[in-house]
Image (cartoon, rainbow, N blue to C red):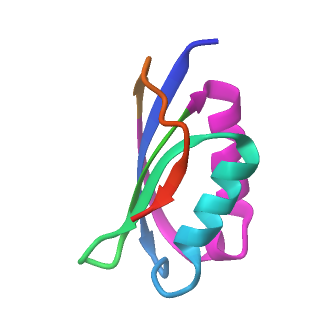
Amino acid sequence: MQKQTAHIRVYGIVQGVGFRFTTQMLANKYGLGGWVANLPDGSVEMEVTGDKDTLDAFCAALRDSRVGAGIDRWEEKRFPSSDAPLQFEVR
């Protein structure tokens, strides 16, 4: 199946609540590569790479998680990817 990369930015109460580490835990659970980082404006940005169905499941699990309850706005763009990072890192 074709790999995709999802570039996601979330807003709300997403810093100081374990959001990045929950994101990393879920990415590792689903076997996804990429990264997540806090931004100065209080939002969190991430890039996650995997197949479409796995990315869909990851996004749903993150939104349904304890820290996902703090999300006020979710912006996501997906694009085809042939280069998948092997690990998921917190930046």
Q: Is residue 63 left or right of residue 37?
A: right
Judge whether residue 82 is colored magenta.
no
Please give the count of numbered marks on the rendered protein.
0
Judge whether residue 68 is colored magenta.
yes
Q: Is residue 81 left or right of residue 57?
A: left
Give percent across and percent down for residue 83: 42, 23
Picture quadrant of residue 26 = bottom right
- Residue shown at 49% from the left, 77% from the top: 14
Give percent across and percent down for residue 74: 46, 57
- Residue shown at 29% from the left, 71% from the top: 39
Q: Residue furthest bottom?
A: 16
Q: Quadrant of the C terminus?
A: bottom left
Q: Which residues are magenta?
A: 50-77
The image shows residue 4, relative to residue 66, as above or below, that is above
Q: Quadrant of the N terminus?
A: top right
Q: What is the chief secondary structure element of the magenta stretch?
A: helix
Picture quadrant of residue 44 = bottom left
Give percent across and percent down for residue 78: 43, 31
Q: Residue furthest left?
A: 40
The front one of 28 and 5 is 28
The image shows residue 85, relative to residue 9, as above or below, that is above
- Residue shown at 44% from the left, 59% from the top: 36
- Residue shown at 60% from the left, 60% from the top: 24
